[in-house]
Amino acid sequence: MLPMTELVDALEKAGLEVRNDAGTLGMYASDASLYRIPPLAVVRPRHTDEVAAALDVARETGVPLTSRGAGTSVAGNAVGRGIVLDFSRHLNRVLNIDPEARTATVEPGTVHAVLQKAVTPHGVRFGPDPSTHPRCTIGGMIGNNACGSRSLAYGRTSDNVAALELLTATGDKLTTGPNGDSGGPVIDNVRSVIGRHLATARTEFDRFGRQVSGYAVQHLIPERFDLTRALVGSEGTLAVITKATVKLVVDAPVRVVVVLGFRDIVAAGEASPAVVAHGPTSCEGLDSRLLDVLRARRGPDAVPPLPRGGAWLFVELAGDDAGEVDARARKLAADGIADDALVVTDPATQARLWRIREDGAGLAGRAPSDRPAWPGWEDAAVPPEKLGAYLARFDELVASYDMTSAPFGHFGDGCMHVRLDLPLDQPGGTKIMRDFLTDAARLVGEFGGSLSGEHGDGRARSELLPHMYSPDAIALFKGIKHAFDPGNLLNPGVLVDPDPIDADVRPAGRFPLKQLAMAYPHDAGDLGQAVHRCTGVGKCRADNSAAGGVMCPSYLATLEEKDSTRGRARVLQEVVRGELAWSHPSVHDAMDLCLSCKGCASDCPTGIDMATYKSEVLHQTYRGKLRPRSHYTLGKLPFWARLAGWAPRLANLAIRLPGLGPIALWLAGVDKRRSVPAFARRPFRRTFKPLTTDRKPVILFADSFSDAFSPEVAESTVRVLRAAGYEPRLPSGSVCCGLTWITTGQVDKARSILTRTVTALAPAAQAGIPIVGIEPSCTAVLRSDVHELLPGNADAQRVAGSVRTLAELLAQTPGWTPPDLSDVEVVAQPHCHHHAVLGWKADADLLAASGAQVQRLAGCCGLAGNFGVERGHYEVSVAVAAQNLLPALDAAPGAVVLADGFSCRTQVADLRERPAVHLAQLLDRASL
């Protein structure tokens, strides 16, 4: 193959946007599959002519080319050794909408959710809706023939594409559609190939709805020749899509969900055909083992009430008449199909149920054994009437390999998704993987099924196609491939002449790293296992604000893969493999715009925690070395705040003096466009006076921010606690959570600080006295980060269990009721750590009980502690604030802004010169 430098030169001479730095190649080496294949270069075409130019270079140099959308392919369909074309960055527009014809024309990188948003005002939608719909691209859906949960109503992607424009590897333009196909000799060549294999083409394909594996040969036989549908599902191996016209459907306005409970997943599978007879739009199966993972990660409230059972079918019925749909739902619930049933009409509860199903692939990334679980056999399908028997046999097969699983999927179509705890970290792990996948392929062949039901075969299953198809069918596939791509340039190793299923397995082997700063208690102390939690499903590339999420603010600001949680995880996977050093510029480029918001820790279904990994990177890079200026200033802010507390007026004057102030900010590594909060004239700890009363004691954790900058917040907290029947006490000595040291990677010092703090708080925790935090980020350290920094410390565990937010404590206080806030309009910006670690439910419940009119904002405020203050981060910080916070503030100029986080209040003041209050202040003022 051509050397990388010569290839990049050729691509750049063609005027293409090319990336070949180590970080980009590491990020694009993987999709959402098991496989790691670094490309030689990544090209981001800006228009169709650039796609043709990239193909010309590939053809002239003999370098293969792989098309890529959002990179959410689970079978290894979107990775390749040559040029990777990323369509998602620029070729992502909706070009035309025809409401009368019910069609839309899009570029291949158009995100599914973007298309839906564009067509919804016309009363239509694109039918297929895979679980990755907030971030997957239409081109990727066409490549895999994606289906989604509502395929019972809307069919597969192949049923919803009207026309295509493509480029072949030979450089010919190919058009397909209702007005006829054109493309030179390739069409005649394909007809000739089919003519030699007609019997096979007519008998081995299209046996049931989810038979997706291989090429869609049934659409190439003479009596039903449809090149458009034949190309859907060809996984980028036959041509490169440049434009697609898709069909649109009218969505039924009324939806009711019926949840059916069964003793186990086999019974749920057996019942699916009877459920489908009721005409649902969706029939999705979930195993209790999957929900156990969710509850273990997010608590018992993460799953809404369900009917009794060990497995469930989520069944959606839809129509135009509410009474008719409700009657159908109640008839299904009473039909005796299930052991128990629940009819759900509330849209919010329905949305919670569907989010659980959509997060299935990420949640299943942790097996019931609490080991990492992997794709590879995640998409098999059988005729629906055989699903129950297949599930029973599949469970037996999994158990025979001493593995565990938590199946879920599109049971109404006979399609099962699952991830398996393959022992890839053990010697011989890839051989076990090969043996299992081979046995699984034999099993699905025995049931007359398909290796893939919607994900495509990719590198995970193409080698196994002979277990499903005859030798003549395999020869037919080769003939079709040669007719379109005689030079084997397009996505080689997939479908035809496939790569071995156990080659290039990304997580194979062990990657032990020594002298880690963090404990990684949920990953057995293994950073390699921690960063491989990222399965690549790409939820971090979506706007999760509609569901109240935070992840991933930096990606939404830049739309760069390196600024997504997934991109960072992929780069760190290169680090643990030894391919990149901790200090490599690509590593720091990926980590630079991470806000350490911890949104991924709660919003990513895999439970990844990029904030912790960033601290590790900074620790490993700068340990014993000179650090960035901001680490010595902002990273040690509590230390400087304590010093300033002895002469706050002098400190404030130094910051604000003309000439001296800007120099001080520059020396501190602070962006000159930022205002610096003034130090309080008298820190809270010096003014607090405990009272001798018979009220119940609580320990008030007066953090450095509340003490040095916002003593009025701490004072309000004291008054609210006393009014609720508590007497606050301060810990003995000066305590700090060490947060600023943690976020700047000064982990050894943070551990020392936190050890002293835990020692000071331990007697209260042992005595059962609650510890109430004021600042959410500091409170979150005491509840969560303490386990990373002080593993096995019994006092730390007791302290973590004793920590409460103000709202949590008040909710547990018998007889306490909030003041009447019914005349108050509130715009609430929960701190990211409050959302991700502590949970904001207690606050939401308290405000609801007060009668306040609350608009709870999703997303991050953008300041994120020291992040938005540091030089080089201002633009991104403001762009993050513009996602949710600033529009809400501008739309409600008279509302009270509620922001418990000091950084959130600072951002509001900085960007809108508007006051914001802590919950304690809101309650305190209402009680006066």
Image (cartoon, grey):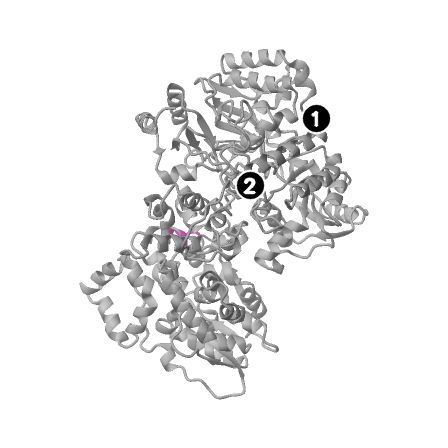
Q: Amino acid at mark 1?
A: Arg
State the residue in front, 645 or 160: 645
Quadrant occupied by the N terminus: top left
Nearer the camera: disc 2 or disc 1: 1
Q: Which residue is mark 2?
A: 120
Q: Position of residue 488 (x, y in %)?
A: 48, 20
Is any atom of residue 830 visible in this view? Answer: no
Seen from this angle, which residue lies furthest front? 427
Image vertical order of residue 709 relative to residue 160, above or below: below
Determine which of the numbered discs, if any, sits on residue 238 in the image.
Answer: none
Q: Which residue is mark 1?
A: 207
Q: Position of residue 632 (x, y in %)?
A: 29, 62
Tell me the quarter of the picture where residue 471 sits. Answer: top right
Instruction: Sort mark 2 into few (<14), some (14-19) or many (20+) by Cα contacts within 10 Å.
Output: few
Q: Position of residue 899 (x, y in %)?
A: 45, 65
Secondary structure type for disc 2: helix
Tell me the quarter of the picture where residue 748 sits. Answer: bottom left
Is any atom of residue 168 visible in this view? Answer: yes
Mark 2–mark 1 distance (CA, rounded to whole Å)? 34 Å
Instruction: Sort mark 1 into few (<14), some (14-19) or many (20+) by Cα contacts within 10 Å.
Output: some
Q: Amino acid at mark 2?
A: Thr
In this image, 350 relative to 22: left or right? Answer: right
State the residue in front, 355 or 787: 787
Image vertical order of residue 741 relative to residue 440, above or below: below
* Highlighted magenta segment, given as a residue range: 879-883
Secondary structure type for disc 1: loop
Magenta stretch: helix, strand or loop mostly: helix
